[in-house]
Amino acid sequence: MSSFERHYAELAGRKGDPCSRQYPKGTRSISGSASFDSLEGSEIKCSGSVMITGELAAQKLSLSGSLRTGSALCCDANASGSLHVTGHASFGTLYASGSVVIEDALECGVCECSGRLEAKEIRADSVWVSGFVGSELLECTRLNAEGGGNVSKVKAVELKVNSRSHGLFSLFRRGDFKFQTLIASEAAELDMASGHVVAAKRVRLGKKCKVDDVFYVESYEAEDGALVGSAKKVSSLEGIERWRTPWKSRD
């Protein structure tokens, strides 16, 4: 088991896990405009406009309206509207088909984004993107990105990025998937992606990739048309971030 997998295997048992918390019974439905110091319930449905200065805590959240909160703790969240968290957010599962902004870190078991998701840091077990994701750090066990993105650093066990395979419903998709450093302890498969460094045990690049430097342990493939500055075989990925070559300007 990799260090990433061990980390996320412990998610369910961590203190503050949103799915192990006991929530007050009952459903709260908000269809108008309302403000709260804090809001808690087993199920919260919001189709209106809600402002929470403190914490939002729910076993299940259904959001089709607009909600702004200081922090969020939800086992199951479905956001087809607009969710803005000014602090930290923790979800068991997050389905973001609308707009989700987390100003601090997002912790999640399963994250599916067909809308627009932005967070300072994202740590999850599995992440699937057909919309757009933006973050300084995206760390997960498995990443499947069929939409656009702008992420400074990506760390995963296995990842697949193929922006050209996005579906008709990717309303929030914006261009290809851009990154600075992308590290996969096992496999990295990319197309319509551009960045500075890709490092993985096995690397495969499609014809529409633009990468400055590639480091690989076992295998490396690049289709005709892929723009790669250099590809180097290494014995280990340990310390790979320190090997990054100087950034090369690109039009």
Image (spheres, rainbow, N blue to C red):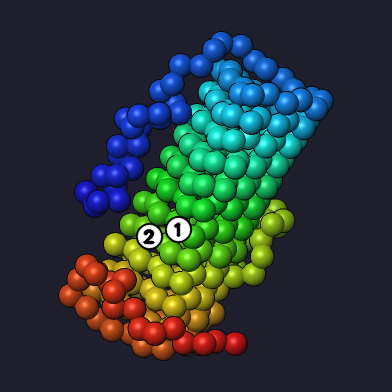
Q: Secondary structure at mark 2?
A: strand
List x then y, in percent, for residue 24: 54, 12
> What number is the disc on residue 209?
none
Q: Secondary structure at mark 1?
A: strand
The residue lying toward the viewer, choosing from 221 and 38, is 38
Q: How many numbered marks does the figure carry?
A: 2
Q: Residue at x 33, y 43 (%)?
A: 8
Percent coordinates x, y for residue 36 in the rendering = 68, 24
Tell me which residue sits at (31%, 71%) in the image: 241
Q: Which mark is residue 155?
A: 2
The Cα atoms of the two marked residues, 1 and 2, are separated by: 8 Å
Q: As shown in the figure, which amino acid type bears the numbered disc 2?
A: Lys
Note whether residue 223 is visible. no
How crowded pointer 2 is (Cα within 10 Å; few <14, some 14-19, many 20+) is rated as: many
| Image coords of residue 2 (percent x, y) | 24, 52
- Please, which residue is most extreme toward the top here? 25
**Nearer-the-camera pick, 202 or 6:** 6
- At label 1, counting other C-alpha atoms closer than 10 Å, the crowd grade (few under 14, some 14-19, many 20 or more) is many
Q: Where residue 137 is drawn, which disc sits there?
A: 1
